[in-house]
Image (spheres, grey):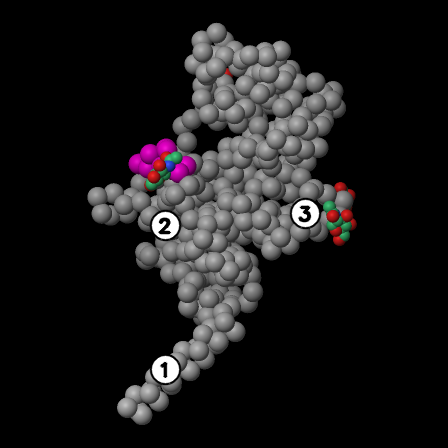
């Protein structure tokens, strides 16, 4: 009797002690056991360094260690002494070029975030001050240790498809779906398919923030961006030039009422299209510039600025892809993530909005409005290295 009571007391005390330890060392516990991500499949096509060679320190740019190791593999075949293998370097020039390009894009982000002459709302706040609902664009894949911030109108369907494949969350007859293009469109955009940061609260309670920070530190974070004005043209074409009941009711009717002298616009998008009524691109820009728009509700994600969707000054992205070079960037990224043997980026055959159409599209927009629009999107231009479209703004 006495022994079993002693034993019970021991168990209780021991458990309490363990819990205390876990609370105190949560960071280390979390970092070293719970979130270790191991690639599910064997090595990719490109030679990579063994994991233990990578530096353990902080958020060391793993790509830098990659590039070192990659170069070393050719420079130091076995001996560890550099040898003259210049031809090999030349062969791998595209790889080195893409590495350098990423380095530049990351450095630009850092510079712009540190530069006080680049000002935008909530630039100075800390990660802890970002409300949960503004973290809903960060998709987490624990299996491979990847975080993707999706930006609508920047190949986000395809990247969401890849995240679904990688997370193996979609089963097809009992086995994970491996073909990104086989995933139906409505499923791709169904939020229940993606584990996003704003869902952490539900799952992890008060540890949510802490876990997010651990994951942000350990995982590879990427996003894709494109020229902000071209993104707007693409959003307009996709949502208002094609019949879309949802966008018609939520936005097009508002634009028609406010800017097109249509106090009673047609009730449905089919009716409107059958009589040839839809808001013009100029109406759309007017809507974006109207202070009332943000008062009613925050910009819809299809035209919300990237700095508001992805918080690039609070989250240090490892990889910044550009839609303008989507294919080579995608190939490079999948290789860096070591999943290039698991999934391939789907090539797009759709009629992409081209930068060269910009002047045509904006020809109906008054120059003054273009300049205001530039101010609205200037942080995105500057953070991601897109040139100010002088020819549009200086007319
Ligand atoms: C900050 O940006 C301004 C342009 O807005 C530029 O002239 C200046 O050189 C930048 N400062 C630094 C430290 O990069
Ligand atoms: C952000 O902080 C800098 C100084 O660190 C300050 O000059 C700037 O006005 C602040 N910006 C905002 C929007 O609060
Ligand atoms: C998303 O998927 C869930 C279950 O997979 C389903 O219940 C829900 O209706 C879907 N939502 C939409 C908007 O399709
Ligand atoms: C793509 O769309 C634009 C306008 O929406 C049109 O002018 C162009 O002809 C289209 N191109 C192709 C190849 O379909």
- Mark 2 neighbour class, 10 Å CA radius: few under 14, some 14 to 19, many 20 or more: many
The disc placed on residue 167 is: 2
What SS does tag 1 mark? Answer: helix
What SS does tag 3 mark? Answer: loop
Give the farthest residue toward the left: 173
x, y percent for residue 221: 51, 51
Give the farthest residue toward the front: 1
Residue appearing at x 63%, y 28% in the figure: 293
Q: What stretch of residues is rendered in magenta?
A: 182-190
The disc placed on residue 123 is: 3
x, y percent for residue 362: 63, 20
What SS does tag 2 mark? Answer: helix
Whether pointer 1 and pointer 3 mark residues with C-beta atoms closer than 8 Å, the reply is: no
Measured in 3D between alpha carbons, the distance from the residue under mark 1 to the one under mark 3, in whole angstroms, is 50 Å
Vertically, is 266 above or below 247? above
**Quarter of the figure that contains the N terminus:** bottom left
Whether pointer 2 and pointer 3 mark residues with C-beta atoms closer than 8 Å, the reply is: no
Measured in 3D between alpha carbons, the distance from the residue under mark 2 to the one under mark 3, in whole angstroms, is 32 Å
Whether pointer 1 and pointer 2 mark residues with C-beta atoms closer than 8 Å, the reply is: no
Tell me which label, 2 or 3, sits earlier in the chain: 3
Residue appearing at x 37%, y 33% in the figure: 186
Q: Is mark 3 within 8 Å of ligand 2?
A: yes
x, y percent for residue 382: 67, 40
Vertically, is 179 above or below 289? below
Q: Is residue 185 magenta?
A: yes
Identify which residue, 314 or 360, lies in the foreground. Answer: 314
Q: Image quarter for residue 157? A: top left
């Amino acid at each position: 009797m006495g022994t079993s009571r002693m034993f019970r007391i021991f168990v209780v005390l021991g458990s309490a002690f363990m819990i205390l330890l876990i609370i105190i060392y949560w960071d280390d516990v979390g970092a070293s056991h719970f979130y270790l991500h191991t690639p599910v499949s064997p090595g990719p096509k490109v030679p990579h360094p063994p994991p233990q060679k990578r530096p353990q320190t902080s958020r060391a740019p793993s790509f830098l260690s990659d590039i070192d190791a990659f170069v070393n593999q050719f420079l130091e075949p076995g001996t560890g002494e550099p040898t003259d293998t210049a031809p090999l370097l030349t062969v791998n020039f595209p790889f080195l070029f893409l590495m350098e390009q990423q380095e530049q894009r990351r450095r630009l982000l850092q510079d712009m975030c540190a530069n006080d002459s680049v000002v935008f709302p909530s630039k100075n706040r800390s990660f802890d001050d970002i409300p949960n609902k503004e973290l809903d664009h960060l998709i987490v894949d624990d299996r491979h240790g990847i975080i993707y911030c999706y930006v609508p109108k920047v190949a986000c369907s395809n990247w969401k498809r890849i995240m679904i494949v990688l997370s193996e969350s979609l089963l097809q007859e009992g086995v994970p779906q491996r073909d990104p293009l086989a995933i139906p469109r409505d499923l791709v955009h169904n939020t229940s398919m993606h584990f996003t940061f704003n869902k952490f609260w539900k799952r992890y309670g008060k540890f949510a923030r802490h876990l997010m920070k651990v994951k942000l530190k350990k995982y590879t974070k990427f996003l894709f961006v494109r020229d902000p004005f071209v993104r707007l043209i693409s959003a307009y074409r996709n949502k208002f030039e094609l019949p879309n009941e949802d966008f018609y009711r939520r936005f097009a009717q508002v634009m028609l009422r406010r800017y097109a002298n249509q106090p009673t616009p047609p009730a449905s998008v089919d009716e409107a299209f059958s009589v040839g009524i839809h808001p013009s691109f100029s109406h759309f820009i007017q809507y974006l510039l109207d202070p009332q728009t943000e008062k009613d509700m925050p910009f819809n994600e299809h035209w919300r600025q990237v700095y508001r969707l992805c918080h690039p000054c609070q989250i240090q992205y490892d990889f910044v892809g550009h839609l303008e070079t989507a294919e080579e960037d995608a190939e490079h990224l999948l290789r860096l993530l070591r999943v290039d043997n698991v999934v391939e980026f789907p090539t797009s055959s759709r009629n992409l909005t081209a930068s060269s159409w910009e002047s045509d599209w904006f020809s109906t927009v008054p120059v003054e409005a273009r300049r205001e629009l530039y101010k609205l999107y200037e942080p995105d231009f500057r953070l991601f290295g897109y040139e100010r479209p002088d020819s549009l703004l200086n007319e």
